[in-house]
Image: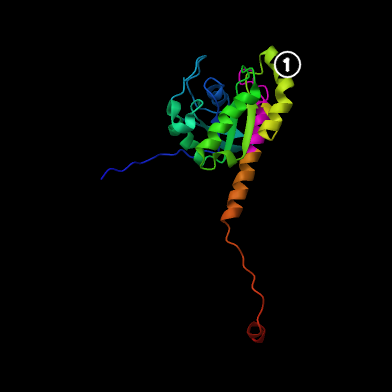
Amino acid sequence: MDILVEVKLLADVAVVGPPNAGKSTLLSVTSQAKPVVAAYPFTTLEPVLGTVEHRGDRMVLLEVPGLLEGAHKGKGLGLEFLRHVERARVVLQLVDGLEEDFIQAFRLIDDELRMYGEGLSDKPRVVAVTKMDIPELRSKAAKQEPALAAAAGSEPELISSATHTGITKLLDRLLLTVQESTAMGEAAREPAVVVKPHTQRDRAL
């Protein structure tokens, strides 16, 4: 008998995005994890876990290797990577600030999460635009931010892991989102209390 065992890593936040969007750099500056960081795509070929200490609390971040268009069909080992997102409470989607069209870049990954299924697109999500230490990218982000907020359904965070710009604000938001998601999950597991009306026999007793 052949048995296939799939290991799905458990994390509070799954960090997703295209290759070279800054996932490894973010993990390296917010945790003790030591992912490979380089200025070329596909430097991360395996998911990487890192524990983030913030405001007296902690979160486990999972860096998912870069996703390509068609990842939900298995392109670029996409199925191997996306399955790890299933057990995360929150998704942090990074948009590469070097992209010309932030909305198009957002939708590419958003589509992959939705088409993969398994509730990935329904998870609480925070969107962050990276590499905001580059001056010309900041002006581009200011122009595209409103449209990206409309597409994502919430205000994106503008960050730079190189200069730590916006990192504290991002971690504040992630921690709150994780706490809210955890509270909702615990409430959903609580048994329902059924209140039945008193009958004539109950009153007699």
Q: Which residue is mark 1?
A: 139
State which quadrant residue 190 falls in. Answer: bottom right
Looking at the picture, tell me which residue is in the foreground, 104 or 6: 104
Q: Position of residue 205 (x, y in %)?
A: 63, 85
**Is 200 displayed left or right of 77 in the figure?**
right
Looking at the picture, tell me which residue is in the foreground, 112 or 140: 112
Q: Position of residue 151 (x, y in %)?
A: 67, 31
Looking at the picture, tell me which residue is in the foreground, 29 or 17: 17
Specify whether residue 69 is in view.
yes
Q: Amino acid at mark 1?
A: Ser
State which quadrant residue 132 falls in. Answer: top right
Specify whether residue 46 is in view.
no
Secondary structure beneath disc 1?
helix
State which quadrant residue 75 falls in. Answer: top left
Residue at x 45%, y 32% (from the top left corner): 73
Question: Split into 4 quadrants, where in the image is the N terminus?
Answer: top left
Q: Is residue 194 above or below residue 59?
A: below
Q: Residues within 10 Å of mark 1 (few under 14, many from 20)?
A: few
Q: How many marks?
A: 1
**Is-magenta flag for residue 174?**
yes
**Is-magenta flag for residue 202?**
no
Q: Is residue 116 above or below residue 197?
A: above
Span shown in magenta: 158-175
**Is 18 displayed left or right of 183 in the figure?**
left
Q: Position of residue 69 (x, y in %)?
A: 51, 26
Residue at x 69%, y 12% (from the top left corner): 136
Looking at the picture, tell me which residue is in the foreground, 117 or 92: 117
Q: Position of residue 102 (x, y in %)?
A: 65, 23
